[in-house]
Amino acid sequence: GENVEQHPSTLSVQEGDSAVIKCTYSDSASNYFPWYKQELGKRPQLIIDIRSNVGEKKDQRIAVTLNKTAKHFSLHITETQPEDSAVYFCAASKPGGYNKLIFGAGTRLAVHP
Amino acid sequence: GAGVSQTPSNKVTEKGKYVELRCDPISGHTALYWYRQSLGQGPEFLIYFQGTGAADDSGLPNDRFFAVRPEGSVSTLKIQRTERGDSAVYLCASSLGVSGSEAFFGQGTRLTVV
């Protein structure tokens, strides 16, 4: 079955710096790759997603890139702010009419003022 | 409702007891998912419902776990003979019933088996 690996497990940056989180997936049939942000004790919330027919997607300070050949995708956060501090999860799912999301283990991002 | 609602938010039970966890999805969402999140890990898929039927239950760890969605809306995850290893946050999510549609998560139920 699908396996998603995520790196790094923890990331510490200074406010204003950029942060990059990387994920690799094993199943080449996967075609949907969302990123979720989870603050302590709260629900995971979708922040951006990308489908396999697109190589890059950007939403203000957040961007995601996808390399289908290498089976990896990355989250880029620019001009980080303390409120970006949270755990970020990548996930992958395959076509089939529903979203059986396989998640990475998460990256704990700390943005220091 | 405004989002996915899960009750209770916290549940402490003794080893060997039976528990039920409830999920109320977003109105109109035909797809409903249960995930389990252990400390420091990503959510792990348990089961998916499309309407009333369990279309994919491949993530249920064993036959102590069962879930229903009798009217295609509210779902209940049932765990029999609970074990300490069942302790985790159980997350419910719902979405439109098409691949690649956003899955909206509930706040989760934190289950602690003592």
Image (cartoon, coloured by chain):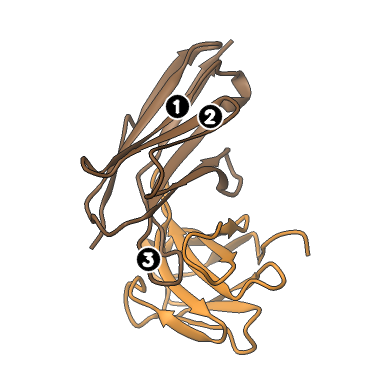
Chain colours: A brown, B orange
Residue B18 seen in this snapshot: no
Q: Is residue A19 above or below residue A43?
A: above
Badge 1 and badge 3 both on one subunit: yes
The mark nearer the N terminus, 1 or 2, is 2
Residue B7: where, in percent of width, then height? 66, 66
| Dot 1 and dot 2 residues touching (CB under 8 Å) | yes
The residue carrying mark 2 is A62
The residue lying toward the viewer, choosing from A39 and B18, is A39
Q: Residues within 10 Å of mark 2 (few under 14, many from 20)?
A: some
Q: Residue at x 25, y 53 (%)?
A: A3
Q: Is residue B31 above or below residue A27?
A: below
Specify the amino acid type for callout 2: Ile
Badge 1 and badge 2 both on one subunit: yes
The residue carrying mark 3 is A95
Specify the amino acid type for callout 3: Pro
The mark nearer the N terminus, 1 or 3, is 1
